[in-house]
Amino acid sequence: MTCARTTSLGAYLLGALDPAERADFEAHLAGCADCRAELVRLSPLPGLLHRVGVEDFEDAVEPTAADLAVVPAPAPAAPGRWARHRVLLSAAAAVVALAVGGVIGYSLLRAGDPAGPGVSWSATDSTSGVRADVQLIDRAWGTEVKLTLRDVPPGKPCKLVVRGRDGNREVAGWWSSSSLQDEVIPGSTSITRSAIDRVEVVTDDDRVLVDVPAPA
């Protein structure tokens, strides 16, 4: 049976959990194979959400009551905290609903989305010692990212940041460093491959673990 706490992954991926909630979920994630597997499956969604517009919903199948039941109502919160997080929590619920309803997948499949040529970049940070191997694959909607990390400090929530040559910045995915050591981490961005200047792995407190620039 799938773990009931997988419904918290949307909020986790979008950074909508407060520090105490995030620490609690990280502790759960370290011991739950179901949630770790679902984290890998959903990690590209933050990047894909950059390209989802109203038109993507026009032909989508209406989600059933059973689909919507997996999105929990937010727990009562203090007014100040709700004011800070209401937008992110709504977006987190949308991540789960879209994943269950297949709207994003439908949108991509509708376009055919053939894979274009890919490139591989690598870098090792001289300070942290973290190594990143990044594969970037052209897609009709932007760029698919496949990331492999080595020697990452355990227990740190990390995000994959893609920076464009024009200064644009997108978060292409979130994950726990303790749960995805040496695994291929998927990500996605609406920035086209030729427009990508660099890829960074950044902790939740904005410390860059490794910076992978485009080859000169």
Image (tube, helix red, strand yellow):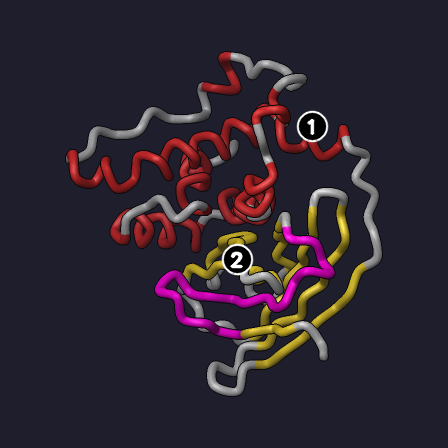
Q: Does 195 appear in magenta?
A: yes
For the residue pair 69 and 197, the one nearer the viewer reads as 197
Q: Residue furthest bottom?
A: 126
Neighbour class for label 1 at 10 Å: few (<14), some, many (≥20)? some
Of the numbered discs 2 and 1, the one sitting upstream in the chain is: 1
**Residue 79 % position (x, y):** 16, 34
Residue 140 in which image quadrant? top right
- Decide: is 163 above or below 129: above
3D distance between C-alphas at marks 2 and 1: 26 Å
Q: Quadrant of the C terminus?
A: bottom right
Judge from the rendering whether residue 150 lies leftward or rightward of residue 114; answer left or right.
left
Residue at 59 percent across and 69 percent down: it is 149
Neighbour class for label 2 at 10 Å: few (<14), some, many (≥20)? some
- Decide: is 183 above or below 17: below
For the residue pair 99 and 172, the one nearer the viewer reads as 172
**Residue 206 % position (x, y):** 39, 66
According to the image, label 2 marks what residue? Answer: 169
Label 1 element class: helix
Residue 103 in which image quadrant? top right
**Residue 2 % position (x, y):** 51, 34
According to the image, label 1 marks what residue? Answer: 106
Judge from the rendering whether residue 4 lies leftward or rightward of residue 129; answer left or right.
left
Q: Which residue lies furthest to the front in this view?
A: 166
Q: Does 215 appear in magenta?
A: no
Q: Which amino acid does label 1 sit on?
A: Tyr
Magenta segment range? 191-210
Q: Kindly check if marks 2 and 1 are in contact, taking CB atoms under 8 A apart as contact.
A: no
**Residue 164 % position (x, y):** 60, 61
Residue 50 in which image quadrant? top right
